[in-house]
Amino acid sequence: MSTHLHAESLTPHPEPISIKDRKSAVLAAIDDNWRQFRNSLDQLVSDDMAKPGVLESQSVTDIVGHITTWEWELVTSLDRGSIEPVGNIDRFNANAADQKKGNTPRQTVEEMEQVHRSLRDQLAKAPTAYFEPYDPVREMIDSCTVLHYQEHGSQIRIWASKFSLASPTTE
């Protein structure tokens, strides 16, 4: 593997990543972080899902619905080929939460799985340019996937370690 020396550090850095490799790396990061997020949910029992308090008054079900909403926003942006501003994000999140209020935890998780499959399909056929650093679509991809899974997965794991009805697992 060839390397380039950077004058600032005089340490070898790998050759720049090709655009195709970058897309593959982003998709791999999404898949890895998605698995970690799903593992956070898999540690819970059904009765845990609707309990408030994971993030203020939100339950795990509410958070799953929130992630699903933003994944769907990304799916529609990729399908359109453009990002449409949502306006006030807090109001957008509140409206989305209100629309999902009557859903059972099972319905919410099923919708999440379906939307995530749609997202992966859209990402697989998305132009490689969308995966370049600093591209506005890449920023949306990161914030609606990896960063979102990390943020909310960690909130769920912390909450579950204190309040889940599931038996503690040994590692």
Image (tube, helix red, strand yellow):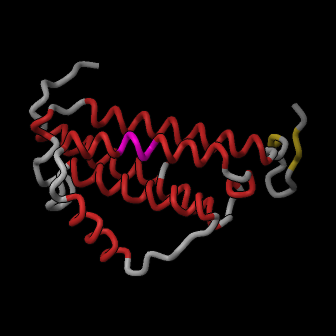
Q: Which residues are magenta?
A: 112-116
Q: Is residue 45 above or below residue 140?
A: above
What residue is drawn where x is 13% and y is 28%?
A: 166
Residue 105 part of the magenta-drawn span: no
- On screen, residue 169 versus residue 154, left or right, reads left
Nearer to me, 167 or 117:
117
What residue is drawn where x is 53% and y is 74%?
A: 84
Nearer to me, 59 or 100:
100
What residue is drawn where x is 21% and y is 22%?
A: 169
Q: Quadrant of the C terminus?
A: top left
Q: Is residue 56 above or below residue 153?
A: below
- On screen, residue 158 versus residue 7, left or right, reads left
* Spot occupied by residue 124 in the image (x, y as percentages of width and height): 64, 43
Nearer to me, 81 or 66:
81
**Residue 88 lies in what quarter of the image?**
bottom left
Type of secondary structure dominating the magenta stretch:
helix
Residue 114 part of the magenta-drawn span: yes
- On screen, residue 32 versus residue 115, left or right, reads right
What residue is drawn where x is 41% and y is 48%?
A: 150
Q: Residue furthest front?
A: 80
Q: Quadrant of the N terminus?
A: top right
**Residue 45 lies in what quarter of the image?**
top left
Q: Is residue 58 above or below residue 159?
A: below
* Spot occupied by residue 162 in the image (x, y as percentages of width and height): 14, 40
* Spot occupied by residue 43 in the image (x, y as percentages of width and height): 24, 30
